[in-house]
Amino acid sequence: MQSAEVNYILKQNPWFASLPENLAKQLQQKCKIKHLNDKQILHQKNDMADGFYCVLTGLIRASNFTLEGKELVLTWIQPGNWFGEISLIDGQPRTHDAHAEGATTLLMCPKAVFDFLLSEDNQWQIHIMRLLCQRVRATFSLIDETGCLSLKGQLCKRLSLLHKGLEEQQHTMTNELSISQDALAQLIHSSRQTVNKILQSLQTEQVIKLRYGKIVILNRLALEKLSQI
Amino acid sequence: MQSAEVNYILKQNPWFASLPENLAKQLQQKCKIKHLNDKQILHQKNDMADGFYCVLTGLIRASNFTLEGKELVLTWIQPGNWFGEISLIDGQPRTHDAHAEGATTLLMCPKAVFDFLLSEDNQWQIHIMRLLCQRVRATFSLIDETGCLSLKGQLCKRLSLLHKGLEEQQHTMTNELSISQDALAQLIHSSRQTVNKILQSLQTEQVIKLRYGKIVILNRLALEKLSQI
DNA sequence: TTCCAATTGTCACATTGACGACAGTTTGTA
DNA sequence: TACAAACTGTCGTCAATGTGACAATTGGAA
């Protein structure tokens, strides 16, 4: 992957884009590229942390498993997004499993480098704090969604967020989300059948169009309206 | 309130207790005491932040409201716990309403002081980062609970956490939680009737004893076992 | 082209849990 | 002691949703 291309992806991310030029360059230069195949494991819950990551292409699925083996998906991490800082900072184990969803490319900043950057340059600390605040706010939002919204509302919210993520990458100027109804069900902790019923109703309302393994967003505003809290 | 008494409460909290002596003293000295009556509002969602707080006595209820006016309780903040740092750090508005639950005493570190401490002494930043990490992990736990556990499991988890909070304060060597079934229902986003049914079953299992406005914990281990993920 | 795996569409059925209703109990206060 | 407010115990009803089943469709690989 070309450096210019990596740079382009990184800059789409608001947090990275807000870094002072010297810090951004520093971080980018000290990272290595890492490839994962579909379904390959990056790390598991309770592993000790080895690095700070950024998705370049593909997706990372962050999830946990119940005692009975049911998978609970927290989120899909889309290109441009950094993750894994929590365990690096507090020295505690990983909070979630991280699996590649499709062939995936990552930037990896090794733990030693991360620690070095943080200790060497005080500038870094405020930016890591901001990243942590974003994480907390995103997590609070998720809690609000699951608590306040009907399944339909939650589904609309997720579709809207996935669409926004797709837009941010810009590579593709499409309204087509490649995601199965099964996967959507996991994202909102629901069942495929229920998701199908909701998607059908959204299709009737002309908000989306259903395709095999894909969803076409016809009316993003309607999605957002349906997912208001 | 006596300074020694304040000191005692503060030291029960693991985060505060882990601060270097000079930082702990610094923070404590620059705080003012603030009293709230039952149901009094400390701040509302979307307010701009004015300070960093610690509960000394009483409780703070952190919650949001749905469009239809239903209250969604995130948590009750117990004595010794600090909160409110997110908005101070990222300059964005408050994430939740904060109401006093019963007569409540707080320590308040005004925004200007907080900013000053953070900018003046680089030592502070790592400790604030650790607090943020705790916040993220606690929030992830909450998501896991609501996703993985039955209502009974969630209820057991909450009872267990409330009991732990009570223990940490130490003032009282009792196993009696003063909380109505109504309030418990709010904590797990359920209904009073359902909570009552679950509590009855726990009483039958000799895990708790029900009293008017109170719950006596008979078997903490059983609670923890029932709330395993 | 043919076949297989993944995905979708749809149904009936069982379970969970919210909600309204109402009676009974406890506590604090006048 | 009497009363009101808060709290608890319990029912029946109803809507939401998980689940198993099975047929139909689609896309990719042999």
Image (tube, coloured by chain):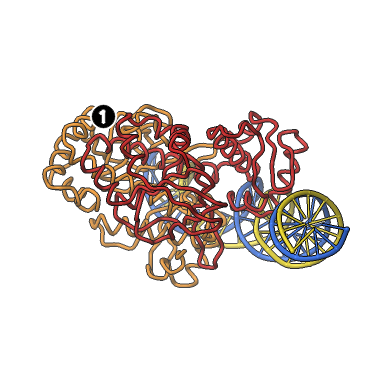
Chain colours: A orange, B red, C yellow, D blue
Q: Position of residue A152 (x, y in %)?
A: 51, 62
A195 or A24, which lies in front?
Answer: A24
In the rendered structure, the residue with mark 1 lies on which chain? A
Residue displayed at 56% across by 38% down: B161
The residue singled out by tag 1 in the image is A111
Residue displayed at 43% across by 58% down: B43
Does residue A165 appear to the left or right of B183 in the view shown? left
Tell which residue pokes out farthest to the bottom in this image. Answer: A205
Residue A224 sits in quarter: bottom left
Question: What amino acid is at disc 1?
Answer: Lys
Residue A57 sits in quarter: top left
- In the rendered image, the quadrant that contains the N terminus of chain A is top left
A168 or A228, which lies in front?
Answer: A228
Q: Position of residue A39 (x, y in %)?
A: 39, 37
Residue displayed at 54% across by 68% down: B68
Residue displayed at 47% across by 68% down: A203
